[in-house]
Image (tube, grey):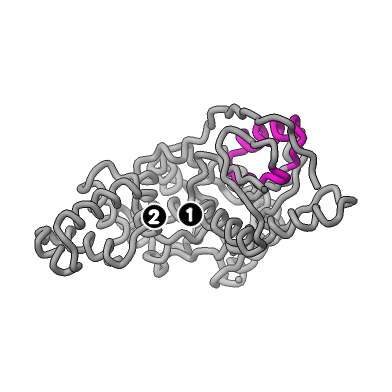
Amino acid sequence: MVAILTEANYISTGCKLRLESLINALRKKRIPFCEIFDTCPRDVDGIFVLSADVEWTIHTIKQLNQNGFTPILISDQIENLPGCIYNGVNSDLSASMKNLLEMLKSHNKKCPALYAFNPNSISDNSKETTLQSAASNLFDKIDVFANNGNLEECYNNFINSEKCYDSVICANDFAAITLVKFLEEQHPQKLKELTIISCSNSAISEYYKDKILATNTNHEQYGRAAVYIYEALKKHEYVSSMTIRIVWDFEIKKKETTTTNQKLDFVHSADTFYDDIAVRDLLVVDKFLNTSDTTDRTIIKMLIRNEPLEAIASECFLSINAVKYRIKRLISASGASDKNHLLETITKYAAGF
């Protein structure tokens, strides 16, 4: 039996896809597993950790180490965490960011900027470090516009800069989409001149592919690689640790266990990225796109057109109560505050879905 521990605040599409990849790989290998939250069972012989926040990751791994566990960490950047012993799968950010900058250079881009990078994120810190390192031979130092929980402030700092940027590398899709929205409303000509790249590929990015160049982060490979590490370490006891790096594509490619149950305590994350209203609204839309089926989407489209429940029920071959139940379930699954909030955010960010 192995256990899976996911950082509670790590709720991005990338986390979901990596978790699905891990579970699918475990099932294919017929390896029993359980998902854990604050307690590690004494009878597990391996723990997989999925996380993004630096402080949470270090704190959690240290606790696991103290109780005899060497976890397999799945994250964007997992190397050299101080005081931690672990194996892992991480993004090959060094190679990926180098490829990204070389792609920009080949398209005659001369002044890129890094946009909405989160100082509390392992991934964003590593992206910034590797981009700056790779840029030394291709560009001057790249300006960074940090997101401290307020994307509008980040945008204002960017648009009021004295430099004239010809490309923007965004930390993720939510940052890229809000940048597009701000530019559409305030500086539409600037939007036409900029090459906007997002360092992720969530479901909602498909609706902006004419304005945003999204990376393919190959999430399906992370779980497979993590299970490979688990099996290799069990088979080869002389191997003390393993790290596998996954490179991104661009469209422009036996362990000791504790003898008792272990209660974990978690530090409060200082990550303020999800405090931004626009980001929370985008999460609502992204969750809707990932959890809805064809009938759900038909219901939402008809609600946006203000069609009555009777007409919706007839179109979907459902009873009115069944339609009401689906609407209630969609509101809950997406995290929207109510029906109007769900319809408004979908209309704003994914019109024509």
Give the alpha-carbon distance from disc 1 to disc 2, as whole Å: 8 Å
**In front here: 204 or 68?**
68
Q: Identify the residue under disc 2.
A: 286
Q: Identify the residue under disc 1.
A: 13
At horizontal 22% and vertical 48% (from top left) the residue drawn is 339
What residue span does the magenta drawing correspond to? 44-70
- Which kind of residue does numbered mark 1 sit on? Thr
At horizontal 65% and vertical 34% (from top left) the residue drawn is 60
Question: How many neighbours does mark 1 have within 10 angstroms: few (below 14), some (14-19), or many (20 or more)?
Answer: many
**In front here: 193 or 2?**
2
Q: Are marks 1 and 2 in contact (CB under 8 Å)?
A: yes
Rendered view: 100 above or below 89: below
Residue 181, horizontal then vertical, whole percent: 34, 55
The quadrant in which residue 5 appears is top right
Question: How many neighbours does mark 2 have within 10 angstroms: few (below 14), some (14-19), or many (20 or more)?
Answer: many
Relative placement, left or right, of 317 versus 161 is: left
Quarter of the figure with the C terminus: bottom left
Residue 25, horizontal then vertical, whole percent: 63, 61
Label 2 residue SS: helix
**In front here: 121 or 86?**
86
**In front here: 231 or 272?**
231
- Which kind of residue does numbered mark 2 sit on? Asp
Magenta-drawn stretch contains 330? no
At horizontal 79% and vertical 39% (from top left) the residue drawn is 256
The quadrant in which residue 191 appears is bottom left
